[in-house]
Amino acid sequence: MTTIAAPNDISARAGSAPPTISRLTALGTLARRRLLLSARTPREIVVPLLTPILFALVIAPALAKMVNSPGLDYKTYVAVGTVGLLVPLSCMFAGIGVIVDRDSGARRELLAAPVPRSLMVAGNFVVALAVSTLQLGALMLAAIARGAKFDATGTGVLWFIAAAYLFATASYGIAEVMANRIPKQEEYVGATPAIAILPWFLAGSLFPIHALPAGLAAFAKVLPLTHALAVMRYGLIDRHATGLHDIWGMSNATGMATLSLVVVAAWAVVLSAASVRVFAKSAVA
Amino acid sequence: MTTGRHRPGPAIEVVDLRKTYPGGVEAVRGIDFTVQPGEVFGLLGPNGAGKSTTIGMLTTTIAPTAGIARLAGYDVVRDPLSARQVSSVVFQEAVVDRGLSGRIHLDMHARLWSVTPDSARRRSAELIESFGLGEVIDRPVAGYSGGQRRRLEIARALVSEPQVLFLDEPTVGLDTRIRYELLDLISGLRERSNMTTLLTTHYLDEAERLCDRIAVVHAGAVVALDTPQRLLARLGDGIVEVRVTGDPQAALSRLRSHGLADADAFAVGATLTVPLHDHSSQSILDDLVSANVGTSSVAVRKPTLDDVYLQLTGDSLAA
């Protein structure tokens, strides 16, 4: 047995604020913890991927055979649309980790740590984003393997990435808010389809929003997913920006894409801020 | 709340600290105490007395409604990061990531508390050995026994060499053997370091064994604060415990009126507890017999902290 060294005398430390960890290091540490936890529960990464991969490999090609869409590769159209299912599902699954932390994990230890509590949200968010990136990569590879044809330039890819990440940010914001507001994991899981799947049917994932009844089309234009998908398609397959035109009715594609990106960014900012606020309120009684 | 200016002085300073939860529940009703560096201080009281709420306020997970609390001079409301930097907590319930190994827990704590990698490695190695965690430290915590997990949590709290350590009911829910092992471990810390420890418990033996001073907490207020020895001395060297068959309050009143029981005598249920002070147990029994008060059992024993608590609050610690 070795002895435990005595801590320094209090008076020796007095006089100024004690040195605390830098925010970047703290963020890295918190993200590393979340990553280790996620890596030990691979279902968090694999399960959200199942449905979108099924869409890309089976359902989209099957639908493409039924749908007559001149000038449009429907398989590819649906492949991009499937991103709108994958990202929210992935983020909602990440939210389960927040509930587990709260109910049976080390959240209270982290709350007692000398780091700003907003970094706990940020650490989880960083990992959710990384997992979503992996999943998006897998989805795209699956789609390409099944014959999806993307017509992307470097700028187009940037439009896609910007829209995807901003939408993922908004999605994780919702997940974090719900995870901190909903007391039981069962209730959270029960609410997931309403948040992650329902909007997907209305946001132009499988068909353009102009095919919806007028009321629903107007509602779809408010959804961040509608804007995100329109920008993603504009970047990868829809050079004529027909999805964006359905939203804005303008002729300047870049202008419409910028506007839609601003809408998604606004949702991302609002939901991220809400997630930090809700977390802080739920963490301190 | 007053200034959060940092200044040397007590390790823990609590002044008129209050917490009222939404709905008007007053969990803590204005408590005051000061804990000096190196002292082991106990908050003793039953469940619901306000002990955990007090720790929650000191560790910044519960916002005080009013009052001042400082750790090593850092105001927990105005300078929470500094207050957290100088302290560590062992929570009442298990607060671990069950999928991660014990070593990762120590490592995470060290990183978040800004312990340099070299110090963290050295300190972790010492703690793993001292706490007998060598065989399990690289296994997921999910496979730990209750005692191993508790030891890990205490070791984790010590990696950062905190100036103030909070132990919230550290042995609750553990079986007797593990509980005594942990008490031995905690008392070892007491002997080996100058760290300030604030311990909450409702186990009297724990408080008596570990604490330099004890604050008895009842219904959100401190009703007594002293060393265990002085608290016990309040009731003298011995007490007589008499179970009566008649009205215990009437019997107690009679003893008081005859000068055989002081204000510190009390009745709980059918049992009278009378500190002997200058009286003999026989004189008390004689007086009860002469009043035709039946007795079903009589015991003379040394006072315990339970007696102190009952005398102070009229409640049982086991409540």
Image (spheres, coloured by chain):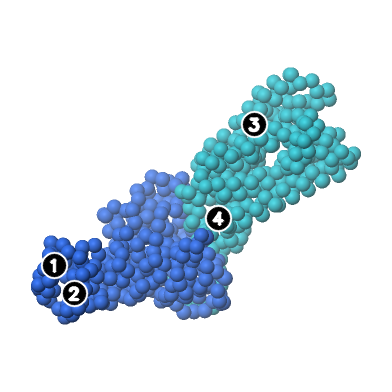
Chain colours: A cyan, B blue
**What amino acid is labelled 3 in the image?**
Pro
Could you say whether the residue bearing mark 2 is in a helix, strand or loop? helix
| Residue highlighted by disc 4 | A282
Residue A219: quarter of image: top right
Closer to the observer: label 3 or label 4?
Answer: 4
Query: Do marks 1 and 2 share a chain?
Result: yes
Q: Where is the C terminus of chain B found, in terms of image quarters?
A: bottom left
Residue that mark 3 sits on: A52
Q: CA distance from mark 4 to mark 2?
A: 55 Å
Alpha carbon distance from label 1 to label 3: 83 Å
Q: Are marks 1 and 3 on the same chain?
A: no
Q: Nearer the viewer, mark 3 or mark 2?
A: 2
Q: Position of residue B220 (x, y in %)?
A: 41, 67
Q: Residues within 10 Å of mark 1 (few under 14, many from 20)?
A: some
Residue drawn where x is 34% and y is 56% of the image: B172
Residue occupying image coordinates x 17% and y 79% = B258
